[in-house]
Amino acid sequence: MKHLLDLRGVICPMNFVKAKLKLEEIQYGEELEIWLDDGEAIKNVPRSLRDEGHEILKVERGVSGFKLIIKKRGEINGY
């Protein structure tokens, strides 16, 4: 199942905090589609989520921002 979170217009570091909170709501192995603005958001959020242990599946530029697909990883064996 894929979940959606639109963070366009949300400033750093709140966009990372909101993404992290959303990831807490979903199951391990599920995907989260996040929409982010250009600039600080697309530079910092993917890196921070990767540092938290999640897998970045795709980063794609759209007409009105960037689409980021994240796979939630667990603490046991990376799942």
Image (cartoon, helix red, strand yellow):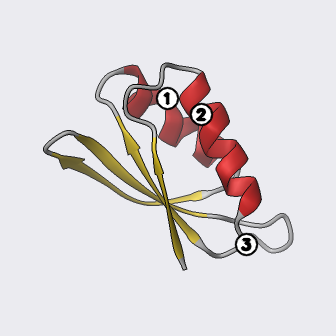
Is residue 46 positioned above or below 38 on the image? below
Q: Could you say whether the residue bearing mark 3 is in a helix, strand or loop?
A: loop
Please state which amino acid type lies under the numbered disc 1.
Asn
- Residue 32, x across and y down, in percent: 52, 62
- Counting residues from the N terminus, which is met first, the one under dot 2 or under dot 3? 2
**Residue identified by numbered label 2:** 16
Please tell me how crowded label 2 is: few (under 14), some (14-19), or many (20+) other residues with Cα within 10 Å: many
Of residues 39 and 9, the one nearer the viewer is 9
**Circles 2, 1 touching at the beta carbon (< 8 Å):** yes
- Mark 3 and mark 1: span between their CA atoms? 23 Å
- Mark 2 and mark 3: span between their CA atoms? 18 Å
Please state which amino acid type lies under the numbered disc 3.
Gln
Please state which amino acid type lies under the numbered disc 2.
Phe
Q: Give the quadrant of residue 16.
A: top right
Q: Could you say whether the residue bearing mark 1 is in a helix, strand or loop?
A: helix
**Residue identified by numbered label 3:** 27
